């Protein structure tokens, strides 16, 4: 196995996504790797909003990105001293893979929501799509089961 130099951990700001942070931070520390914390803002609004509201999509995306960056800045100190923050707009799995390629990431750490079979079949899974297309290994942190 090659040395891990860069670890990417993703968040959608849900409690489930936060479960991956500890493992990502520990892994980065153990290998002396750079840790990148990323959030992807979906770049689409419901068609009715765009059609009937007088809104500027670019301005909405800019505001969402700014809000996301502030949230990441609040989270980052808990993950370690030197955490790189990344916010992107787009389809989450596409942007996660793009970031991993662009930043030459050696490991992606992400949590999965563990949605039901029907929801998964209809919507798919961001995690599954990242697994299929990632340029590096992906470590999945599952949501704990309530027995």
Image: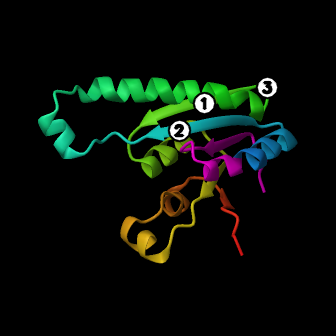
Residue 88's x, y, as percent?
Answer: 45, 34
Number of numbered discs visible in the structure rendering:
3
* Disc 2 + disc 1, Cβ < 8 Å: yes
Mark 2 and mark 1: span between their CA atoms?
A: 8 Å
Left or right of residue 143: residue 124: left
Between 97 and 140, the one nearer to me in the picture: 140
Judged from the image, the secondary structure of the residue bearing numbered disc 2 is strand
Q: For residue 26, which quarter of the picture?
A: top right
* Disc 3 + disc 1, Cβ < 8 Å: no
Q: Which residue is mark 2?
A: 39
Left or right of residue 42: residue 30: right
Which residue range is magenta in the image?
1-20
Residue 8's x, y, as percent?
Answer: 64, 42
Q: Which residue is mark 3?
A: 81
Q: Which residue is mark 1?
A: 72
- 147 inside magenta stretch: no
User: Residue pushed farthest right?
Assistant: 30
Looking at the rendered image, the quarter that the N terminus falls into is bottom right
Q: Which of the numbered marks, if any, corresponds to residue 127?
A: none
- 8 inside magenta stretch: yes
Left or right of residue 26: residue 76: left
Instruction: Please report the residue visible at 48 percent of the width from the left and 76 percent of the height from the top.
Output: 117
Residue 99's x, y, as percent?
Answer: 52, 40
Instruction: Please report the residue visible at 66 percent of the width from the left and 62 percent of the height from the top.
Output: 143
């Amino acid at each position: 196995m090659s040395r891990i130099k860069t670890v990417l951990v993703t968040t959608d700001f849900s409690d489930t996504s936060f479960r991956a942070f500890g493992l990502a931070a520990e892994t980065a520390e153990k290998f002396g790797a750079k840790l990148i914390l990323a959030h992807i803002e979906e770049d689409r609004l419901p068609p009715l909003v765009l059609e009937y509201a007088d809104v500027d999509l670019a301005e909405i995306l800019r505001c969402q990105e700014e809000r996301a960056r502030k949230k990441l800045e609040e989270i980052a100190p808990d993950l370690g001293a030197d955490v790189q923050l990344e916010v992107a707009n787009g389809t989450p799995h596409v942007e996660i893979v793009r970031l991993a390629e662009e930043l030459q990431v050696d490991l992606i750490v992400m949590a999965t929501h563990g949605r039901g079979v029907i929801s998964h079949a209809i919507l798919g899974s961001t995690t599954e799509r990242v697994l299929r297309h990632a340029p590096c290994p992906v470590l999945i942190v599952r949501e704990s089961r309530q027995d």
